[in-house]
Image: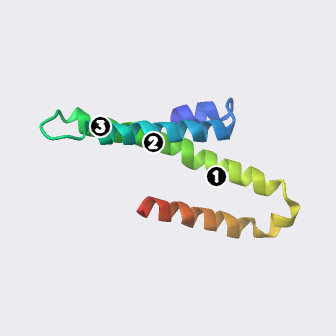
């Protein structure tokens, strides 16, 4: 999270979302290849740790991109709160799935 805070002022949010997705892809591939019987516990923990490292990049940067996109459209000014709540609910559903 600290790395995300430091980079958010220097790197475009869309790039940070891509970095977060890369963490998720690498962690997911690690789960696929490393989760086998009779292996060390690191093989189970490391892919999950790598995947979780990607979440702060994806969540906060997507919300920032969304807010910037809505702010540029004056016609959406009255619907900002509704659209933010729909975005939050969609993120919650994604977490449940």
Between the residue at mark 3 and the residue at mark 2, the CA separation in whole angstroms equals 14 Å
* Residue most extreme to the right: 74
**Residue assigned mark 3:** 33
Mark before the other along the chain sequence, 3 or 1: 3
Q: Pick whichever, 27 or 70, lies toward us.
A: 27
Between the residue at mark 3 and the residue at mark 1, the CA separation in whole angstroms equals 32 Å
Residue at 61 percent across and 31 percent down: it is 7
> In the rendering, which numbered label is found on residue 24?
2
Residue 73 lies, in percent from the top left, at 84, 58
Residue at 55 percent across and 35 percent down: it is 19
Which image quadrant is residue 57 in? top right
**Residue assigned mark 1:** 63
Q: Pick whichever, 71 or 43, lies toward us.
A: 43
Q: What element carries label 1?
A: helix
Residue 40 lies, in percent from the top left, at 17, 33
Q: Do the residues labelled 3 and 2 touch (CB within 8 Å)?
A: no
Mark before the other along the chain sequence, 3 or 2: 2
- Is residue 29 positioned above or below 96 on the image? above
> In the rendering, which numbered label is found on residue 25?
none
- Is residue 59 positioned above or below 90 on the image? above
Q: Pick whichever, 83 or 30, lies toward us.
A: 30
**Quadrant of the image for the C terminus?**
bottom left
Badge 1 crowding class, 10 Å Cα cut-off, few under 14, some 14 to 19, many 20 or more, is: some
Residue 26 lies, in percent from the top left, at 42, 36
Q: Nearer the viewer, mark 3 or mark 1?
A: 3
């Amino acid at each position: 999270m600290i790395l995300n805070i430091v980079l958010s002022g220097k790197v475009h949010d869309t790039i940070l979302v891509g970095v977060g997705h890369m963490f998720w892809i690498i962690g997911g591939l690690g789960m696929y290849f490393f989760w086998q019987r009779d292996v060390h516990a690191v093989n189970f923990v490391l892919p999950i740790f790598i995947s979780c490292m990607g979440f702060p990049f994806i969540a906060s940067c997507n919300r920032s991109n969304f807010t910037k996109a809505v702010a540029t459209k004056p016609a959406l000014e009255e619907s900002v709160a509704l659209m933010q709540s729909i975005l939050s609910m969609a993120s919650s559903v994604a977490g449940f799935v």
